[in-house]
Image (cartoon, rainbow, N blue to C red):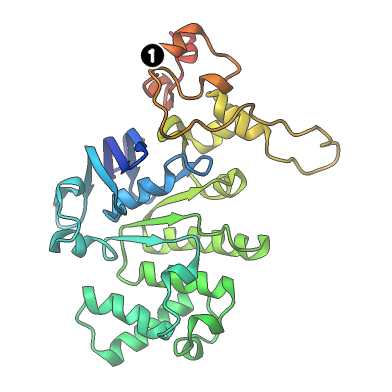
Amino acid sequence: MSDRSILLEIRNLDVNFFLDEGTVEAVQDVSLDVFQNYTLGIVGESGCGKSVLSQAIMRIVPPPGKITGGEMVYHGGNAHSIDLVKLDEKGKAIRSIRGNEIGLILQEPMAALSPLYTVGDQIQDVLRQHSSMSKPEAKAYIVELLDQVGIPKPDIHVDQYPFELSGGLRQRVVIAMAIACKPKLLIADEPTTALDVTIQAQILRLFQELKETLDISIIFISHDLAVISEIADEIVVMYNGRIVEEGPARKVFSEPLHPYTIGLLKSVPKLGEGSRERLTTIEGTVPDPFMKSEGCAFYPRCSIREEQCTLECPALAEVERGRKAACLPIQSSSR
């Protein structure tokens, strides 16, 4: 990995939500690197902090959420590097990056598209903010863009409203909107969850094609391990706001290290003749977000827990070359 250029460096990022009931530490001490022309998969259960992390990168964490620590250094074009955490979330600097150099694709297309405007008008609105194209130039470019993301008859669909399109076509429109300004980084937050498996496979192929043709980096967020396995080069596993495992996708799937990752993989159904094993479940429940513990948050559900796990919160540490895990017993056995 050292021979690759880093596009985004996240170090010790904390995001808290300050509620009347207490403080929710949604993202805790998260550090990761996003490399150029690379797909980083982030996986974990609902509520583990995946989506909040994507919101933090875009600087759109909804109130009462707030970034309370860490840095996110973006190495953009023109030889400049900038800490996104230090930018005013409503200022000109972040607006020039958001939607332009970093694009975001949401899980539900209708949440990103207005029912009141045509597909072409909505993509044109993005272009108007970040380019000086004339209206006819923008219209022609949008038609090309819709064709690039696999929308048939783009010259017709460009003038249609989102409710006139299928779910798969709407998701392609959202992807077209996200890549309209040729971003360097694309964040896809559960982009295939609402789609059937056939359309899901088509969208995954589209992401692979866009990565190669546009030379972009992708952060692909999902709770679905099967989806992540199809697209990711590197995998980050999150639990209770923290990264618990990180490594090359092939290694994480073939030789998972952290007990949580092992449990996730064992709960995935296996296809094929002879695959009659009963699915296993991870015992226990996800921790109460308002409860704080000095030790490992996964301790009550862990199969290899030791007494030290109740006393110390394990930091993410390298346990073998290119692989990290936040687990004290694993770290001890690797020494």
On the image, the x and y values in percent for residue 253 come to 58, 34
Q: Amino acid at mark 1?
A: Glu
On the image, the x and y values in percent for residue 109 come to 48, 68
Q: Is residue 96 above or below residue 155?
A: above
Between 1 and 51, the one lying in front of the other is 51
Residue 92 is left or right of residue 104, and the answer is left
On the image, the x and y values in percent for residue 90 come to 18, 61
The answer to whether residue 140 is seen in the rendering is yes
Residue 297 is left or right of residue 8, and the answer is right
Residue 290 is left or right of residue 4, and the answer is right
Q: How many marks?
A: 1
Q: Is residue 111 above or below residue 139?
A: above
Q: Quadrant of residue 250?
A: top right
Residue hosting label 1? 312
**Residue located at (49% from left, 60% from top):** 107
On the image, the x and y values in percent for residue 333 come to 49, 9
Q: Quadrant of residue 132?
A: bottom left
**Residue located at (13% from left, 64% from top):** 92
The answer to whether residue 143 is seen in the rendering is no
**Residue located at (41% from left, 64% from top):** 213
